[in-house]
Image (tube, rainbow, N blue to C red):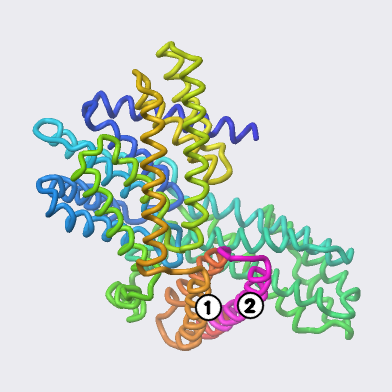
């Protein structure tokens, strides 16, 4: 907790400092643009964009300028604005929501809405243009400060944590104890690292040297984990205790990078035990050798060598951008339905606010942007939480501002709400902080009751529009997602089978292996406990199959060398 407090405090102070500097550089009219820039920088912290910095900078700058251009066009004519806003929000929704990965819609969507509701012209518009260029540079600068060498640094920590949990699991098997917690940790850590490696790809396909090696290490640890599950299911697992002891010692050696202490011969001695299945011994020996070789190799790579990418063969057809685009661009896709829904409702609320000249109508648009989600069930839950949070947040402001008249003290309340935001554990708590901060900021000079009333009113209208959209505009339910993810997993397995014996498919096999992590993380969305249990059992089976296919690829590769 102490570490979290320190980290969140540093981040909060840094945000305040950045926005203050941004405001002084580009004017008060662009303050909110600064908020979205720092939000984007923090959101992208989970991705490593340093492998192709110029290309990624260009992408971010293009999107930033896109939001500027379309927001400028939209405010020129209220009727043309309907089409422009629909297109802009659809494009943002489509580009930054994903069927498998975590959505990145928020920073760019907010940026677009801020520019719509706080339009700029003349010098302010020119400064806004400059601020977006500056923001793009800043985002990439943050990447190089914090994310350079992320695969190796974060990967090392995660691999050590996986090793720790494997060690605990071995002891649990030996002592015939439950190890569900260790299993959950191992799978979660594996999928986390898969995501980090996947996000560092170049041209959305090629892996850097450190990413390639890390993938093989990850597979080997995952396979050890699968072998441990298999041994635990044996009726005579007690006779494997000595073998597990030696595997335990080797995992410690690898975790500590103490390679000279490794003694594979001890493992080989178990071959003379006729009661033990020799397949387990041989697999453990092969996996320990692979881990020692790969961990040693990644640790001696220079920074330049880690980021090196070998584009020695073309991207296969099933990974071509146009192929992926065609595959995902259909009306049955969650991201397409979400993007259409966001575009329609977003454009309508903006039009409504402008046509009726609603001074606080922007809160209606911000509400639907927050509440509209790819899955209907998530939206319904958010609607209830958002209304409750708005009422609670509004009440807090009424009471606080009723008791506190000093402007400095009121400003402190706003800052406190912003500071507490990262500590909230759910959407409702976050929205309470957001409501307090937003309403208090608007009401700081007076009119508190009216501001609270307006906030509640427009949030409720936004919530109603969201419910209507969820019901009538291309609804997409969690069960639809489950069906889609199972189909994707099966097609991925089939593609791996097809690619294994082909030449020059190293990257393809690794990409497919990494994607499984996103599928499994996405499956965490479930309507009830029974569904979660069934899904866990299903994916355990598919995970083993994918790992076995990767094992076949490793064996095929080693034979071909």
Q: CA distance from mark 1 to mark 2?
A: 9 Å
Which residue is labeled 1 in the image?
486
Crowding near the residue tagged with mark 2, few <14, some 14–19, many ≥20 C-alpha atoms within 10 Å: few
Question: Is residue 38 depicted above or below 550 in this figure?
Answer: above
Viewer-proximal residue among 494 and 331: 331
Q: Secondary structure at mark 2?
A: helix
- Image point 25% across, 35% down: which residue? 359
Magenta span main SS: helix
Q: Is residue 329 magenta?
A: no
> Where residue 407 appears, x then y in whole percent?
40, 13
Crowding near the residue tagged with mark 1, few <14, some 14–19, many ≥20 C-alpha atoms within 10 Å: some
- Image point 56% across, 37% down: which residue? 423
> Where residue 40 appears, x then y in whole percent?
36, 44
- Image point 45% across, 27% down: which residue? 13
The quadrant in which residue 544 appears is: bottom right
Instruction: Say which quadrant the N terminus sits in.
Output: top right
Q: Which mark is residue 527?
A: none
Question: Is residue 344 depicted above or below 502 in this figure?
Answer: above
Question: Is residue 300 depicted above or below 358 in this figure?
Answer: below
> Where residue 419 appears, x then y in whole percent?
50, 30
Q: Is residue 546 left or right of residue 13?
A: right
Which residue is labeled 2 in the image?
538
Q: Is residue 537 magenta?
A: yes
Magenta range is: 524-553
């Amino acid at each position: 907790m102490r570490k979290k407090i320190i980290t969140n405090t540093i981040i909060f102070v840094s945000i305040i400092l950045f926005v203050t500097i941004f405001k002084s550089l580009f004017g008060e009219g662009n303050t909110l643009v600064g908020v979205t820039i720092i939000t984007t920088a923090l959101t992208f912290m989970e991705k490593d964009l340093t492998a192709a910095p110029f290309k990624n900078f260009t992408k971010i700058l293009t999107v930033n300028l896109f939001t500027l251009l379309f927001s400028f066009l939209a405010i020129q004519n209220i009727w043309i604005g309907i089409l422009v806003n629909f297109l802009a929000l659809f494009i943002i929704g489509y580009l930054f929501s994903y069927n498998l990965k975590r959505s990145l819609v928020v920073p760019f969507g907010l940026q677009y809405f801020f520019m719509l509701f706080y339009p700029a012209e003349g010098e302010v518009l020119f400064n806004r243009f400059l601020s977006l260029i500056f923001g793009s540079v800043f985002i990439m600068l943050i990447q190089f400060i914090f994310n350079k060498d992320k695969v190796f640094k974060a990967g090392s920590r995660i691999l050590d944590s996986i090793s720790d949990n494997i060690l605990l699991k071995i002891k649990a098997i030996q002592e015939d104890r439950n190890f569900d917690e260790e299993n959950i940790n191992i799978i979660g850590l594996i999928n986390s690292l898969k995501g980090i490696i996947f996000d560092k790809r170049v041209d959305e396909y090629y892996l850097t040297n450190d990413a390639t090696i890390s993938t093989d290490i990850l597979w080997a640890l995952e396979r050890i984990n699968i072998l441990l599950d298999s041994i635990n299911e044996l009726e005579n697992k007690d006779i494997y205790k000595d073998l597990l002891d030696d595997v335990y010692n080797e995992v410690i050696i690898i975790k500590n990078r103490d390679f000279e202490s490794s003694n594979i011969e001890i493992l080989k001695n178990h071959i003379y035990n006729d009661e033990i299945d020799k397949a387990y011994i041989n697999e453990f020996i092969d996996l320990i050798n692979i881990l020692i070789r790969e961990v040693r190799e990644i640790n001696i790579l220079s920074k330049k060598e880690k980021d090196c990418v070998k584009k020695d063969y073309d991207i296969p057809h099933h990974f071509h951008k146009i192929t992926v685009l065609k595959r995902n661009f259909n009306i049955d896709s969650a991201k397409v339905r979400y993007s259409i829904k966001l575009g329609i409702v977003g454009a309508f609320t903006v039009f409504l606010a402008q046509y009726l000249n609603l001074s606080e109508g922007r809160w209606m648009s911000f509400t639907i942007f927050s509440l509209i989600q790819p899955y209907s069930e998530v939206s319904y839950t958010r609607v209830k939480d958002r209304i409750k949070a708005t009422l609670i947040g509004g009440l807090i402001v009424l009471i606080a501002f009723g008791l506190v008249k000093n402007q400095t003290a009121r400003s402190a309340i706003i800052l406190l709400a912003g500071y507490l935001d990262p500590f909230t554990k759910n959407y409702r708590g976050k929205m309470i902080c957001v409501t307090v901060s937003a309403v208090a900021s608007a009401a700081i000079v007076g009119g508190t009751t009216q501001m609270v009333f307006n906030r509640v009113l427009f949030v409720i209208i936004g919530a109603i529009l969201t419910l209507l959209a969820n019901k009538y505009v291309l609804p997409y339910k969690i069960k639809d997602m489950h069906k889609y993810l199972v189909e994707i997993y099966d097609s991925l397995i089939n593609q791996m089978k097809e690619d294994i014996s082909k030449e020059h498919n190293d990257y393809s096999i690794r990409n497919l292996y990494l994607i499984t992590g996103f599928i499994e993380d996405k499956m965490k969305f479930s309507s009830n406990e029974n569904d979660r249990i069934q899904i866990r059992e299903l994916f355990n089976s598919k995970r083993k199959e994918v790992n076995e296919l990767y094992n076949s690829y490793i064996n095929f590769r080693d034979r071909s060398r």
